[in-house]
Amino acid sequence: MTRRGRAKQRRRGGVPDWVWGLGLGLIVVIAVGGFFFITESGGDDGGTCDQELPPLGSSEISQSAFDEEDAALTRVISMLNVGDREGAQSAFFGPAHNFTHNVDPPVRQKDQALARQLCEAIVIVEEGFPLGLASSQLATGMQDVQNLIRDSAEALGYQRPG
């Protein structure tokens, strides 16, 4: 640090800029985390899953599509289990994520409760990546999504993948 920088720091009370930045960042993380905790612990998702998830791209809804989705989710879970969050995020947010949204309408027509459970599990995973949930927590959430996708295949008359 230069002599001028140290003099400036003493005039401000001796707290380096990085400490102020860290403190502000921590406040933001606590506020966002608190909001996430309150909304999740309240048991109400604010109506997000009362209606169909918005479509993403296009997805075929078929036995082979369910099998491909199951394999894709297995890869994502494996990546999370070894701590590869970035790889898992890249593998999930694409065709695999699109399928989770696009399967919602036909599932909702057959089983409203199952579609809502699937939607809620997807929202947790979607929010978990940017909020920095631990890889193990994301893997558990992704396993829930995978099991609900398997249940959805059966609900739509297909064989259960996996």
Image (cartoon, rainbow, N blue to C red):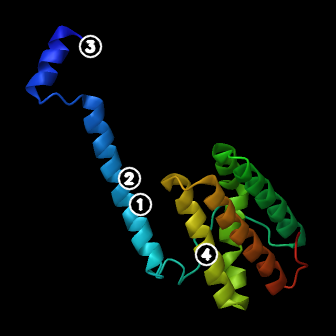
Mark toward the start of the polypeptide (2 vs 4): 2
* Image quadrant assignment for residue 142: bottom right
For label 1, the crowd category at 10 Å Cα-Cα, with few meaning under 14, some 14 to 19 and many 20 or more, is some
Between the C-alphas of marks 2 and 1, the distance is 6 Å
Mark toward the start of the polypeptide (1 vs 3): 3
Identified by mark 1, the residue type is Gly
Residue at x-position 67% and y-position 77%: 104
User: Of helix, strand and loop, which one carries label 4?
Assistant: helix
Pick whichever, 147 or 60, lies toward us.
Answer: 147
Mark toward the start of the polypeptide (1 vs 4): 1
Between the C-alphas of marks 2 and 3, the distance is 29 Å
Residue at x-position 80% and y-position 59%: 74
Q: Which residue is mark 1?
A: 33
Q: x and y percent of residue 9 in the render? A: 16, 23
Between the C-alphas of marks 2 and 4, the distance is 25 Å
Q: x and y percent of residue 58 in the render? A: 71, 63
User: Of helix, strand and loop, which one carries label 1?
Assistant: helix
Q: Which residue is mark 4?
A: 119
Residue at x-position 86% and y-position 85%: 157
User: Of helix, strand and loop, which one carries label 2?
Assistant: helix
